[in-house]
Image: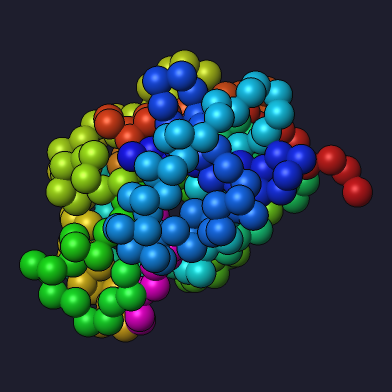
């Protein structure tokens, strides 16, 4: 199933894709937001999907899309997870995942603008696969890790490069307000190959392909990431892992290719969908 989160005059809601369009109910009618449904497990999520499939079609202009999970408990990002991207960034391919974080203030939905801040012009694109955790897990083995995945989505880990490299820790350049495109849909794991292995991932800037790879090229696949992270931290339902970007980023180009106001950036992952965000300038204070 393919779920969305949205907001309307009735508040936040959850929708499910159908042949006629999205069908949705408010959180008040449904009893849970999407994070709550995921936390309830496959039976609760599946039951909600069946109920939503009988709900009215959502009329155009009466609702606004949100990130699939607007307020994740954790947003765990993985750097340098493709060999070619590690090399183009000036790093040796890692033998242990490079981990940093984002925060919910940075998230924007499909169709909403990614914001270039006033303090920098170095706004870069990074198309990535999102993994959504479906059950509480600690110190899980690689063999059991994929059973902990509820589903997948798409991310544009838009980065402010000069702020990213102000220190050895990257988070300051990775969580500016309005820079993390996320969506449009949360796609349940049963609709996709195990671990989303072997899916084409492509980023386009103004219609021109700037990144193209396959998720089979990840250094650390989804199961390995979950195993490694869960040694350190308990992963909870609705936590998000942003699993890394392939080569082609703007930073590595000569001259660098930065996103600017008026641009349109699209990230497409085979079977998962298409995330599209225009670029806008942050208003002057």
Of residues 217 and 11, the one drawn nearer to the viewer in this rendering: 11
Q: Which residue is drawn at 25% across and 48% down?
A: 189
Q: Which residue is drawn at 27% across and 31% down?
A: 271
In the image, taking residue 60 as reference, residue 269 lies left or right, namely left
Q: Residue furthest top?
A: 207
Q: Which residue is drawn at 23% across and 73% down?
A: 228
Task: Locate residue 98: give its quadrant.
Answer: bottom left
Of residues 273 and 12, the one drawn nearer to the viewer in this rendering: 12
Residue 148 screen position, x and y as percent: 25, 65
| Colour convention of the picture | rainbow
Q: How many numbered callouts?
A: 0
Visible residue check, residue 173 = no
Residue 234: within the magenta? Answer: yes
Give the extent of the magenta segment. Answer: 233-245
Establish if 113 lies above or below 84: above
In the image, taking residue 198 as reference, residue 266 lies left or right, namely right
Visible residue check, residue 230 = yes
Establish if 36 lies above or below 3: below
Q: Residue at x 55, y 30 (%)?
A: 56
Residue 263: within the magenta? Answer: no
Which quarter shows the N terminus?
top left
Establish if 203 lies above or below 98: above
Establish if 155 lies above or below 99: above
Residue 172 screen position, x and y as percent: 60, 64
In the image, taking residue 29 as reference, residue 91 lies left or right, namely left
Q: Which residue lies furthest to the left in this view?
A: 143
Residue 201 screen position, x and y as percent: 30, 34
In the image, taking residue 109 as reference, residue 170 lies left or right, namely left
């Amino acid at each position: 199933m393919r779920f969305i989160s949205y907001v309307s005059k009735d508040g936040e809601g959850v929708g499910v894709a159908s042949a006629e369009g999205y069908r949705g109910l408010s959180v008040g009618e449904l009893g849970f937001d999407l994070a709550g449904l995921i936390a309830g497990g496959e039976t609760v999520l599946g039951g909600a999907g069946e109920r939503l499939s009988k709900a009215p079609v959502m009329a155009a202009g009466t609702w606004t899309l949100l990130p699939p999970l607007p307020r994740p408990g954790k947003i765990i990002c993985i750097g340098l997870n493709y060999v070619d991207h590690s090399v183009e960034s000036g790093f040796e391919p890692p033998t242990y995942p490079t981990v940093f974080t984002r925060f919910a203030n940075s998230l924007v939905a499909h169709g909403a603008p990614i914001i270039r801040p006033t303090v920098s012009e170095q706004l870069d694109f990074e198309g990535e696969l999102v993994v959504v955790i479906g059950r509480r897990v600690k110190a899980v083995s690689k063999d059991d890790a994929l059973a902990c995945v509820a589903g997948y989505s798409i991310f544009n880990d838009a980065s402010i490069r000069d702020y990213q490299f102000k220190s050895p820790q990257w988070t300051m350049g990775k969580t500016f307000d309005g820079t993390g495109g996320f969506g449009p849909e949360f796609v349940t794991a049963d609709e996709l190959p195990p671990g989303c292995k072997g899916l084409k991932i492509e980023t386009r800037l103004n219609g021109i392909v700037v990144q193209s790879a396959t998720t089979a090229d990840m250094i650390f696949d989804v199961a390995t990431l979950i195993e490694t992270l869960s040694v350190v931290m308990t992963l909870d339902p609705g936590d998000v892992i942003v699993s890394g970007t392939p080569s082609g980023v703007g930073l590595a180009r000569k001259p660098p290719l930065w996103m600017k106001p008026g641009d349109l950036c699209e990230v497409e992952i085979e079977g998962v969908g298409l995330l599209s965000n225009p670029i806008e300038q942050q208003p002057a204070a």
